[in-house]
Amino acid sequence: MSYAGYSQLPSGSDHEQRQQQLAASTYDVLQRTGDSIQRSNQIAIETENMGAEVLGELGEQRESLLRTTRRLEDADQDLSKSRVIIRKLGREVLYNKIILVCIILLELGILIGLLVLKFAHL
């Protein structure tokens, strides 16, 4: 019944039934929310584990890159030393060539002198 626009309050059993439905609905929402939170936590744990694995791999790659860098620096130093040695060898080869040319010229001079002396006495 309604009186001046107000409806009559529900009876006791009707009210209890609505409260039970509301409680059941709220429980279902809480249950779904709990399940969703549990799935989210599981995903977060899996993501954290993957992140830890990736971080470990990145650490290994960093160490590998550092070792490679050290090896390259050592190779660069060795190449620098090799360049210095090759330059020294090049200079020594040039000096040896100059000495050989001087010896050949001296021998030619001696030969010419001997030929002149020999033919001059004839």
Image: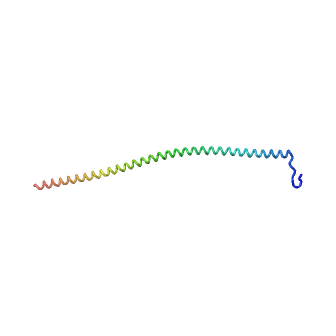
Estimate the x, y position of residue 55 in percent, counting from the top left. Answer: 56, 45
Nearest the eye: 75 or 112? 75
Q: Residue at x 58, y 45 (%)?
A: 51
Q: Quadrant of residue 48 in the image? A: top right
Q: Residue at x 34, y 51 (%)?
A: 87
The residue furthest left is: 122
Residue at screen point 45% across, 46% down: 70
The colouring scheme, among rainbow, by chain, secondary structure or one colour, is rainbow
Residue 4: x and y, percent?
89, 55
Identity of the residue drawn at 68% across and 45% down:
37
Q: Position of residue 113 (x, y in %)?
A: 16, 54
Which quadrant is the C terminus positioned in? Answer: bottom left
Q: How many marks?
A: 0
The one nearer the camera, 84 or 116, is 84
Quadrant of res 47: top right
Along the line of sight, the residue nearer the viewer: 117 or 30? 30
Q: Position of residue 104 (x, y in %)?
A: 22, 53
Judge from the rendering whether residue 67 lies leftward or rightward of residue 84; answer left or right.
Answer: right
In the foreground, 112 or 99: 99
Q: Is residue 118 left or right of residue 23?
A: left
